[in-house]
Image: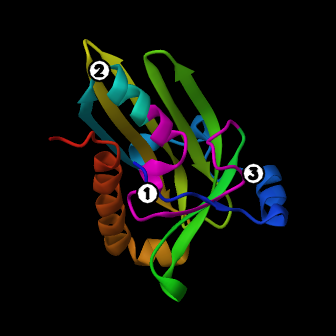
Amino acid sequence: MPDDPVARPLDPTTALALAVAQPTFRPDRHDRGRRFHTLRRDRVIGSGAGDFNAARAALFTWQVQLRSGVRVEADSPIVRLGGVAVVSVGVGPLRIGGPVRIVDVVDEPERAGFTYVTLPGHPEAGEESFRISTDDGLVRFELTGASRPATLLTRVGAPFAALVQHTITDRYVRSLESPRE
């Protein structure tokens, strides 16, 4: 889209601190089934090489988040392995968010995507994966995640946090859909 928002540059000092921070989510050390809320969304978002290439370009420039109303401050405007960002929702002083690190990037002819994990300071402990693929001419977007509250505020506010997460997840899924004529 011509007027797509762009990720804001992350302060270099913050980026450096986040680059060495330990993730608050380690899938090999936690039982997702019991202690983590999981999510999975899968939707056809278009068809053909043009839609796949457009979705791929949008995915790797943070458009899933930005088109969904999530603010992104990143160390790079392009998603890259090891990159860090602070993602947040809200308005002004009522903004809530947290830092993440990209731990996996896939960029192949028929599939593309990335996964980020939470870092200290994020209100949740978890991971989210954003993937697109093409098969039989259809372009699919798949979002998966696992999270649990990481702070007292998010534990106490769990019902509200779940509502926010559900709303943002729905927006994520719609963010890459091809415009229909």
Instruction: Find the distance from the CA under tag 3 to the CA under tag 2.
Output: 40 Å
Residue 97 appears at what percent x and percent y? 55, 69
Residue range of the region highlighted in magenta in the rendering? 56-81
Judged from the image, the secondary structure of the residue bearing numbered disc 1 is loop
Task: Indicate whether residue 139 is drawn in magenta.
Answer: no
Instruction: Find the distance from the CA under tag 1 to the CA under tag 2.
Output: 23 Å
Determine crowd level at label 2: few under 14, some 14-19, many 20+ residues with C-alpha closer than 10 A.
few
Task: Indicate which label's residue lies in the foreground, 3 or 1.
Answer: 1
Question: Taking 76 as reference, is 173 left or right?
Answer: left
Residue 35 seen from this side: no
Earlier in the chain: of badge 1 and badge 2, it is 1
Q: Residue at x 49, y 36 (%)?
A: 57
Determine crowd level at label 1: few under 14, some 14-19, many 20+ residues with C-alpha closer than 10 A.
few
Residue 111 seen from this side: yes
The picture quadrant where one finds residue 46 is top left
Residue 9 appears at what percent x and percent y? 69, 61
Above or below: residue 50 compared with residue 65: above
Q: Which residue is mark 2?
A: 48
Task: Indicate which label's residue lies in the foreground, 3 or 2.
Answer: 2
Q: Which residue is mark 3?
A: 22
Determine crowd level at label 3: few under 14, some 14-19, many 20+ residues with C-alpha closer than 10 A.
few
| Label 3 with label 1: CB-CB less than 8 Å | no
Q: Which residue is mark 1?
A: 3
Amino acid at the residue labelled 1: Asp
The numbered disc on residue 143 is none
